[in-house]
Image: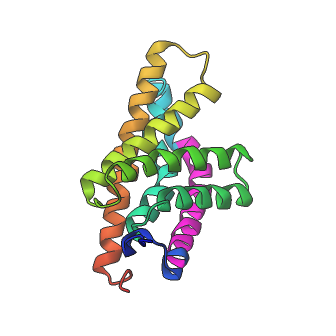
Amino acid sequence: MTTAPNRMRWRPRDIVLASVVGVMAGGLFALWNIAHVPLLEPLGALLPGFQALGHGVWLIGGLLTALVVRRPGAALYGEILAATVSALIGSQWGVITLIYGAVQGLGAELVFALFAYRLWNVVAAMVAGAGAGIAMAGLDLTLFYAGAGAEFFVIYGLSSVASGVLVAGLGSWAIERGLHRAGALRS
């Protein structure tokens, strides 16, 4: 019987670290649940669908957890935990927040899996952000905007992916690098 390489197995330290990151991201989600409306509605008024440019904040839980822990399942775990914390604090979307956590986390997780959990650089983070953005847009457009026109679908979809790439992907990578430089991620 062969054992999985060490980089694939979760250690107790990984569980604790992923949990801390996920809970902190859930707190961020709860704040963004309140702040996003006055900040993003003007974008939607300017061009319907453009408001999704700020939705990448809700993707940070999975991406940051994966970049910090670097283990299979970390993006999914982090995003579901962050969504759970957000829902428990009082998300206006209630239980559906948990579905979003699973779908968005899976969008990022699939990308890290495609890289065989070996690539954790800025490119991998941005591509994983795009994957999470696609997952988020698909769910949003299905559940909340099913009757919208094709133009809205395209603008909303592209804005979601751009936000996933820049806010969640690049942002999470920058946060992880900052934590690493500060020594917060030393074994």
The segment highlighted magenta reads 16-38
Q: Nearer the viewer, residue 80 or 117?
A: 117
Q: Image height check: is 49 above or below 130? A: above
Q: Is residue 28 above or below residue 135?
A: below
The image quadrant where one finds the N terminus is bottom left
Q: Indicate the position of residue 155 as horizontal and vertical percent values.
A: 41, 24
* Residue 28 magenta-highlighted: yes
Left/right placement of residue 88 relative to residue 60 reads right
Closest to the observer, 17 or 49: 17
Q: Is residue 20 magenta?
A: yes
Q: How many marks?
A: 0
Please tell me which residue is depicted at 38% across the width and 59% down the height of the picture. Answer: 172
Above/below status of 9 relative to 143: below
Whole-percent x and y of residue 154?
Answer: 42, 21
Q: Position of residue 50 (x, y in %)?
A: 44, 30
Foreground: 41 or 144? Answer: 144
Which residue is found at the position 35% from the left and 57% from the top? 171
The answer to whether residue 144 is seen in the rendering is no
- In the image, 185: left or right of 149? left
The secondary structure that most of the magenta stretch takes on is helix
Residue drawn where x is 69% and y is 51% of the image: 91
